[in-house]
Amino acid sequence: MLRVFSSLRSKEPYYKRVRAIPKLSYFSTEALVENPQTPSSLEANHAHEDLPSLKFSGIAETVISKCSHLWITNKGEGFSSFSLKDHLLRLSNISPEVVRRFWRVSVLKPQDVLEMLLGFESCRGKYEVEVKKVKSLWGVFKWASEQTGEFEHCPRSCKIMAEMLVRVGFFKEVEYLLSRRESRGVLLDCQEVFSNLIEGYVGEFELERAVSVYGRMRRLSLVPSMSSYQALLRYLVELNEIKLMDYVYMDAIKMGMGGSVAESGIHENVIGCFAWMERIVPDIVVGNKILFSLCRNFGVEQACMYLQKLEELGFRPDEITLGILIGSSCSQGKLKNAFFYISDILSRGLKPHVYSYNALLSGMFKEGMWTHSRDILVEMSEMGVTPNLSTFRVLLAGFCKARQFHEVKAIVCEMAEHNLVTLSSSEDPLTTGFMLWGSAHWM
């Protein structure tokens, strides 16, 4: 029984007790925008039971009476009426040396608050002591702000205060502090604070608040840390919020996350989450979008590894999926890989997309393999894939650069047969081909 109660305390640096896992009923990018709220209004929508008002007996009564701090839900509230002396008295029990010079001060200056915060920043004790310290410092911070309407804290003070609040789990107070600064047109470059807020809310299973903080970060052009991206992604997959997971994951990719060996865990994290939730496999659209971003940002090899792991979970790539690998391989000068992927499409009984063939043609011309271009056209015909305007543009540009002018004439005539160009009997197909190539600046 004692083990059960002791396990209620989190092993993470955030200590709020969690009762239920929420589920977002829908997602839209507008959900990332939220109006700033005060700590009291943030708490108003979360009704909770008052444990001291309940009746317990036996071992439960003993444990709850001795561990009541585990169920404190309004850690940052309840002291707004305290005077400066009240806060200083509580702080003096922790470090009288830091507080000593402020006993006779009736008005705090911004530099005074900063000095006090710096003095207590390195004083860390047990969790209960840390909570009391930060609670009192937050009281001093707010008291100073309310002295006059013109009082303005030093940016460094705000950053230190925010870091302290996050450390002990006063997340709503941190949001209040950041919102107050933003309302005055002052934006704090607290990337670490925001990232820790995301992880903190995820740790408390408050997904909507975690997403809200993430959205605020991105609006401020701040990039979350790798660990906060991973924490949010893991939780989104656990809740089967695949669309939102895709949004966050794609954003992480765009921000350059996952490119190094140290950061490659972000891909493993998403795959691992899918594996853990065996019933969840990303749909083809989401999977293809992720694959395209991986190809563009980290190369086709890493994208291929990602695809292999997805397939182990039951993901079934289509011709577009493999076409993404073909296009990326050709653009990255890996033509041999592209042919492996086109062969894979055929072996799966799929019909290659015209853009896959266009990419192959472009790659072959770049490698000087123009003599095999007609073989591609033959296969396209056999597979029932009709060349489009892009196909002929690639052929025109390739043959012009290879100085295969008889082929240029032939391609222009084929374009006329497909009603892609108008060619009169008096016009020279070669001249028309040069004009089409030069005007479009293809390849």
Image (tube, grey):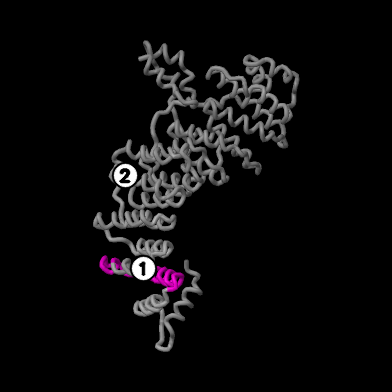
Q: Position of residue 346 (x, y in %)?
A: 26, 58
> Which class describes the residues within 10 Å of circle 2: few (<14), some (14-19), or many (20+)?
many
- Does the magenta run of residues contain 399? yes
Residue positioned 39% across, 31% down in the render: 20
- Residue 31 appearing in the image: no
- Residue 369 appearing in the image: yes
Residue positioned 36% across, 40% down in the render: 271
Q: Mark 2 points at which residue?
A: 281
Q: Where is residue 186 in the image (x, y as percent from the top left)?
A: 65, 41
**Circle nearer the viewer, 1 or 2:** 1
Q: In which quarter of the image is the N terminus?
A: top left
- Taking 259 as reference, is 76 left or right? right
Q: Where is residue 154 in the image (x, y as percent from the top left)?
A: 69, 34
Hey, what amino acid is under mark 1? Thr
> Which class describes the residues within 10 Å of circle 1: few (<14), some (14-19), or many (20+)?
few
Q: Distance between the residues labelled 1 and 2?
A: 43 Å
Hey, what amino acid is under mark 2? Val
- Does the magenta run of residues contain 20? no
Q: Residue 172 carries which label?
A: none
Check if mark 1's residue and mark 2's residue have beta carbons within 8 Å.
no
Q: Quadrant of residue 156?
A: top right
Residue positioned 49% across, 27% down in the render: 14
Q: Name the residue under label 1.
A: 371
What segment carries the magenta color?
A: 379-403
Q: For this rendering, which residue is in front, 64 or 205?
A: 205
Q: For this rendering, which residue is in front, 231 or 153?
A: 231
- Secondary structure beneath label 2: loop
- Secondary structure beneath label 1: helix
